[in-house]
Each structure stands twice: as structure tokens, then as C-alpha cells.
Image: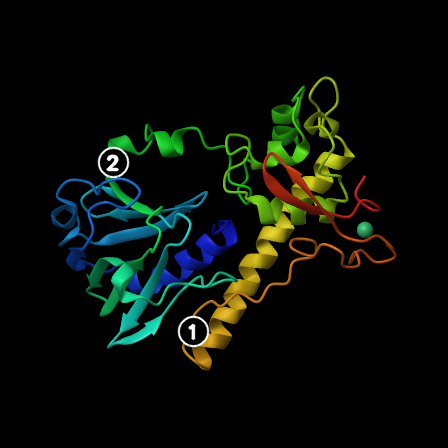
Amino acid sequence: MPELPEVETVRRGLQPAMEGARFVEVEARRLDLRFPLTKNFAGRLEGQIVRGLGRRAKYLLASLSSGDVLLMHLGMSGSFRVSYDGEDNAPGKFHHERSQNNGHDHIVFKMSSGATVTFNDPRRFGFMKILSADAVDTEPLLKSLGPEPLGNAFDAAMLAAACTGKKTSIKAALLDQTIVAGLGNIYVCEALHRAQISPKRMASVIASKTGKPNERTERLVASIRAVLQDAIKQGGSSLRDHRRTDGDLGYFQHHFRVYDREGEKCPTPGCRGTIKRIVQTGRSTFYCPVCQK
Ligand SMILES: [Zn+2]
């Protein structure tokens, strides 16, 4: 499942191909992705100019000159390919292998920028949906999302208030999209390790009884921002490197500190712990039982 940094890297990769460009031709080869495509999908896009390509949590939002918004989600296995004159790039190709099978090319945008943008998704959990301007605020997929972890609304006071009295683990609270939007299993593990907070702690440990933030909350907020920013930066830098060499855009070479590192030495300086894996709410948690308290 792509996480926020990957989606952000995809957004940055698609920006030069799509922003300011017009949909010249839209081809929908499959009408049934995770949801059926919006009626008259091609007709509502063709001729429209992409005014801006934004992101909310793991959703990409293209604002169109018609006022409509094209909502796109990668699902489990979705990816975009950008080609100019038949030469392909795949933005946001992180540690996930992306399908090269053209049989899974479901949606093709021919843009006035000269780029062909192809959405490929073997498992079809991804989707696209056209929203009218007034439907964006009431869209159920977006409405209940908490603040963006890299935005100004996400801070220690907000996080402490959201976790006050919570009877779940801090890990489960951070995965709750209504508390903070777009965080997934990998970066929650990484952020908790960086903040040296045990994933098994109750969420309420980061708030006082009256819901005020404490020293842990500050550390956690800073760690969440840092892991995401680092991952985006690394996606971005490899994006440039790879474009120079083999044209493979955005291959992600990030090495996680704890994620998928069971049995390895903890990377915290001075810590002699070993990374452990446990299962919490059905998902693997990787952490260091020595320095994460
Ligand atoms: Zn450690």
C-alpha cells in the first residue's frame, strides 16, 4: 500500500505533465476500478485544463478549469506512467514493484503538454472519481479525514486533545485517519521509533488528564514530520538521479530504521536493543523494546 510520501512523490512527478495542461484525449479502458468510473468520465475531462494538482492524505486532486475536481487514489497496486514520445517514467516507484503489464493500463490521459499519463492497476483497488466543485467538502472519502501531518493544523495541542482518554494503543491512534490523515503502518513504526515511544503505550500517554500536550507529544509530532519529510526528500532526490541515468523516475531507496528489520540491531546511537516484531490490530509493528519507552 503506497504511503503518503510515495503519493506526494507521485504528485510531484505528475505535476509537470499535468498542471497547466489540457486533457486532449481520455481513454477509459475499464469502467470498474474499486468503484465504477463517474458517468461520462472522458467527456467531463476532455478539453479541461488542470489548474492545480494537489494532495489530501493519500488522494490526488486535480482541479479543473470547469470547476470539477478529479479525485485519484492508487489503492494497493496502482501506479502512473508518464511518457513523452514513447519514453516512459514511473513517478513514485518506491520500494514497491510496479506492474509493467500493459494489460493493466486502465486509464490513459493524453495531455496538451505532450505527455501521455497512464494509470496501471493490476488489483484495481485504486480509483478515479470526478467531483463537482460543491461536492468536494461533502465527499465522504475526504470529509472525515484528520489534519495533514505536514500541515499547520497538525501540532502537539491538536494531537494531545485527540488522544485524551483514548483506550487504544498510540500506534492504533496514529493509524486512525480521523486523528491524522495519511499515516500508514510503515511511517507510524518509524515515527514512534524516532520519538522513542513504545507502540504498546496507550494513546492517552501523550496527553495530560486535561488534554494538554506533554514532552512526548512534542517529540512525536516532530518525529512524524521528520520521517515523512525525509522520505519525500529521498524520493525526490532519487527521482532526479534516476532521470539522469535510466529514466526510471522516483525509485525509492529509503532504508527504514525499524520497519521490516526484525532481529537487527537498533540504529539509535548508544542503544543495544534488537528490533522486535509484534502484531497489533492485525498489522506488524516493528520497534525497539529497549529505547522505545
Ligand atoms: Zn533501541
Check disc 2: other Cα within 10 Å, few if <14, some if 14-19, many if 20+.
Answer: some
- Any part of residue 65 in sight: yes
Residue 272 location, quadrant: bottom right
Q: How far across and down, in percent of the image, does residue 100 sit? A: 35, 67
Specify the quadrant that holds the C terminus: top right
**Disc with the residue nearer the chain's start (1 vs 2):** 2
Which label sits on residue 133?
A: 2
Residue 130 percent across, percent down from the top left = 23, 41
**Residue drawn 63% across and 24% down?**
161
Kind of residue sitting beneath label 2: Ala
Figure check: 125 above or below 170: below
The number of numbered badges drawn on the structure is 2
Frontmost residue, 94 versus 13? 94
Label 1: few (<14), some (14–19) or many (≥20) C-alpha neighbours in 10 Å: some
Q: State the scheme by which the image is colored.
A: rainbow
- According to the picture, the residue beneath numbered tag 1 turns out to be 248
Q: Is residue 34 left or right of residue 132?
A: right
